[in-house]
Image (cartoon, rainbow, N blue to C red):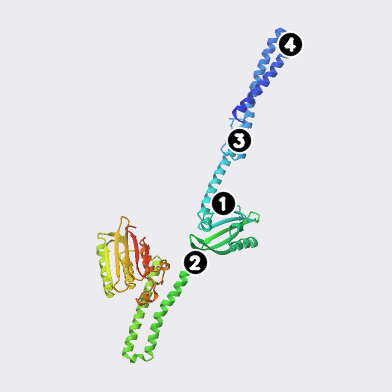
Amino acid sequence: MDDKSRANLFYRYIFIVISVFLLIGLMVISLVANEEQIFILFSLLIGLIIVLVLIYHMFENYVRPIRAASNVTNELVKGNYNVRTYVKPYGEAQKLSNSINVLARNLQEMSIQEKMQGSQWKTVINNMESGLMLIDERGYVHLVNRKFIHMFGNKSVQYIGYLYYDVLTQTSIHKVVQETFLYEEKMTGAITTIINGNKHYIEVVGAPVFNDLRELKGAVLVFHDITELKRVEEMRKDFVANVSHELKTPVTSIRGFAETLLDGAMEDKGLTEEFLHIILKESTRLQALVDDLLELSKLEKEEMKLAQKLIHVDSWIQSIIRLVEQQAQKKSISFQPNIESGVTFNGDPDRLQQVLLNLLYNAISYTSEDGTVGLSLQENSEEVEIKVSDTGIGIPDDAKQRIFERFYRVDRARSRNTGGTGLGLAIVKHIVEAHKGSITVESEVDEGSTFIVKVPKKW
């Protein structure tokens, strides 16, 4: 009740009391003599004033606080916890009003805490790296998070309130849900899906949800994207197979020729010398392979410590150019360096020299005679850009994403003939990334390739 309604009620009470006293006065005056009428009227006036004071006192101390408390209680029922009731300075009404105000403050604080916790939980759920779906005991979807939407598309409103088997078509998911409800235990499954045009492997984990009485109230489905784990596992398998194959070839050659010599071929000096040269070549190749494996292992375990120095490109690049020119002349290849003068940046000069030599030697190896290999080094305000280009065999589109993998070769026969171990570009990538840089490749088959290395000037 608002202030206007309370005032109207008070005035009605006053009007009724005054009317009653007037009626009593009229009745009494008509029954007494004239000299007693003034005394009676004065008595009635005093009684009216006393009654009015009592009514006002009762209204202010009992009626008004109780009505205010009733109004506040109604607002609390509606969920408005900001309201407060009128508090008298004394009496039972004060206790009632104080109790209601304390209740309102507690409810308000609980509401604020609940909203904060709800917001925190929502933030946590939506920022999970795994998809999440909550299903009740009847199979209706109650919750999906942002990662789930990213995995399966659409919007949350197209899932929430629907049966899970109407919005998820994969039978593997249906099986996980059914087994979770049936056995009331955690169940797992797997599906494949397309995300942003790429194939992803998703592990589905279903867990039952129980209340305090151990009654099954639903299930939680968690969707883990294990694509990267699958890729790493495939790389591990490929690595083991490739290492076995790469080691097997030189070991077999060394053993075969050694056995041939022991079987009597040593008497033929010409044949003995030829076999020894082959054994030396294969052992050198084997040593290079082991060295590269150790180097790559050190890089991948992040054991490499860069000797960061200020590199003056004009002097640092000269030894690289001389070494590459010698290799290029042996194949009648034109080497064309284009180095911006005065460039300086921070980095490990020996490791970055290893990067350039590896890229340049690869360019020479995969470029035919009378071809061209180029080296460009430029700078901007934030980074140094190095380009190594060639007019060689090029790289197919399907191989561009794999050339930095261990033992991956675009042309296996040529790579082995040039003594390559298949680990060079993997080592290059690790060194560049250790410098907080990046490496990319642009290539067309039979037209050549360009490797682009970008290294920040300060890191």
- Say what secondary structure mark 1 lies in: helix
Of discs 1 and 2, which sits in the foreground? 1
Q: What's under tag 1, amino acid-wise?
A: Val
Q: Is residue 158 above or below residue 101?
A: below
Of discs 2 and 3, which sits in the foreground? 2
* The one of 108 and 415 positioned closer to us in this rendering: 415
Q: Is residue 148 above or below residue 247?
A: above
- The residue where tag 4 is placed is 30
Regarding residue 57, the answer to whether it shows in the image is: no
**Marks 4/2: CA distance?**
111 Å
Q: What's under tag 4, amino acid-wise?
A: Ser
* Local crowd size for mark 3, using a 10 Å CA cut-off: few (<14), some (14–19), many (≥20): many
Disc on res. 230: 2
* The one of 281 and 214 positioned closer to us in this rendering: 281
Disc on res. 72: 3
Q: Are marks 1 and 4 in contact (CB under 8 Å)?
A: no
Q: Which callout, 4 or 2, points at the residue further toward the start of the chain? A: 4
- The residue where tag 1 is placed is 157
Quadrant containing the N terminus is top right
> How many numbered circles does the render carry?
4
Residue 198, percent from left and from top: 48, 62
Q: Are marks 2 and 3 in contact (CB under 8 Å)?
A: no
